[in-house]
């Protein structure tokens, strides 16, 4: 049950990020001059928006006007992929070690 709730939260964060990025891309807001006002309505969107800003994927050109920095977004995606691969590697290592350890009675 807890695992299912965790996955729902993960999907909510991913959907919120997708909506934010879609808004910026549809407006072609990829330069400071093309920046648009953005409002994150849900708690998930606010958290994701702040994370994208901290990562340098979204930049502010003026108060309440934002744009997607293509290079910053690429770096953000690279870091996410590395983090995901690290988690997978740790998980697989733990599984292999668990299978290798003999069961003693």
Image (tube, rainbow, N blue to C red):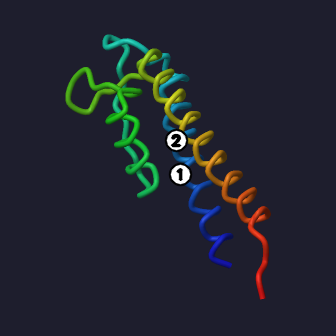
Q: Nearer the viewer, residue 6 or 33?
A: 6
> Where does the image place residue 36, in percent across and percent down from the top left?
36, 25
Residue at disc 2, secondary structure:
helix
Labels 1 & 2 near each other (Cβ < 8 A):
yes
Where residue 56 sits in the image (x, y, percent)?
Answer: 35, 27
x%, y% of residue 23?
Answer: 51, 31
Name the residue carrying label 1: 13
95 left or right of 74 in image: right
Tell me if mark 1 has few (under 14), some (14-19) or many (20+) residues whose alpha carbon lies within 10 angstroms of its own.
some
Nearer to us in this view, 20 or 53 = 53
Distance between mark 1 and mark 2 Cα atoms? 6 Å
The residue under the point 57% across, 38% down is 18
Q: Residue at image x 78%, y 88%? A: 105
Secondary structure of the residue carrying numbered label 1:
helix
In this rendering, position of residue 75 left or right of residue 88: left
Where is mark 2, residue-wise?
17
């Amino acid at each position: 049950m807890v695992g299912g709730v965790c996955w729902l939260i993960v999907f909510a964060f991913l959907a919120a990020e997708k909506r934010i990025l879609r808004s910026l891309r549809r407006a072609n807001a990829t330069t400071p001059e093309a920046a648009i006002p953005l409002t994150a309505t849900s708690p998930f969107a606010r958290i994701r928006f702040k994370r994208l800003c901290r990562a340098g994927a979204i930049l502010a050109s003026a108060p309440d006007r934002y744009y997607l920095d293509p290079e910053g977004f690429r770096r953000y995606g690279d870091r996410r992929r590395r983090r995901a691969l690290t988690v997978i590697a740790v998980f697989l290592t733990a599984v292999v070690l668990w299978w290798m350890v003999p069961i003693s009675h």
